[in-house]
Image (cartoon, rainbow, N blue to C red):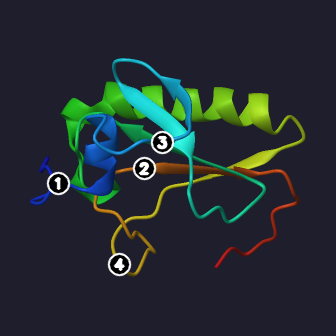
Amino acid sequence: MSEAPKQPTIFARIVRGEVPCNKVFEDDVCLAFHDVTPAAPVHVLVIPKEPVESLGHIDGSHEAMLGHLLRKAGEIGQQLCPDGFRVVANAGGDGGQTVAHLHLHILGGRPMGWPPG
């Protein structure tokens, strides 16, 4: 079931231009910007402009948006980290999600270990 977050998140405020960001990319579907607390030398967030809480809150109406987010994450990751990168989507508290607005992390600029977390 699709459901917008109940309170405006920091990401919704960034989309509306109320909070500045170090923008990497923007179009009518998504916004990508550098994370203010990076976990890697390259740490970019890709967020949909439509406020969806997490991957656990999507439905069939979000398929095009999700495909677009992943395509843009791949393009940005390849551009900023040509030697490789990781894309992560956290969902819910146990999944490590700290902002209730769907977002993809692009991490790179160093070798990524496994398993994560």
Category of crowding for the residue at label 3, using alpha-carbon neighbours closer than 10 angstroms: few (below 14), some (14–19), many (at least 20): some
| Image location (x, y in percent) of residue 104 | 50, 48
Q: Is residue 28 visible?
A: yes
Asked which secondary structure carries label 4, the reply is: loop
- In the image, is 56 to the left or to the right of 89? left
Disc 1 to disc 3, C-alpha distance: 16 Å
Task: Decide which of 20, 9 is in the foreground and name it.
Answer: 20
Q: Residues within 10 Å of mark 1 (few under 14, many from 20)?
A: few
Along the line of sight, which residue is nearer the eye, 81 or 63? 81
Residue 8: mark in rendering? 1
What amino acid type is highlighted by mark number 4? Gly
Q: Which mark is residue 97?
A: none
Task: Tell me which numbered mark, 1 or 3, is placed earlier along the sequence.
Answer: 1
Which residue is painted at 76% across and 47% down in the image?
85
- Mark 4 to mark 2 CA distance (whole Å): 14 Å
The residue singled out by tag 2 in the image is: 103
Residue 93 is labelled as: 4
Foreground tag (3 vs 4): 3
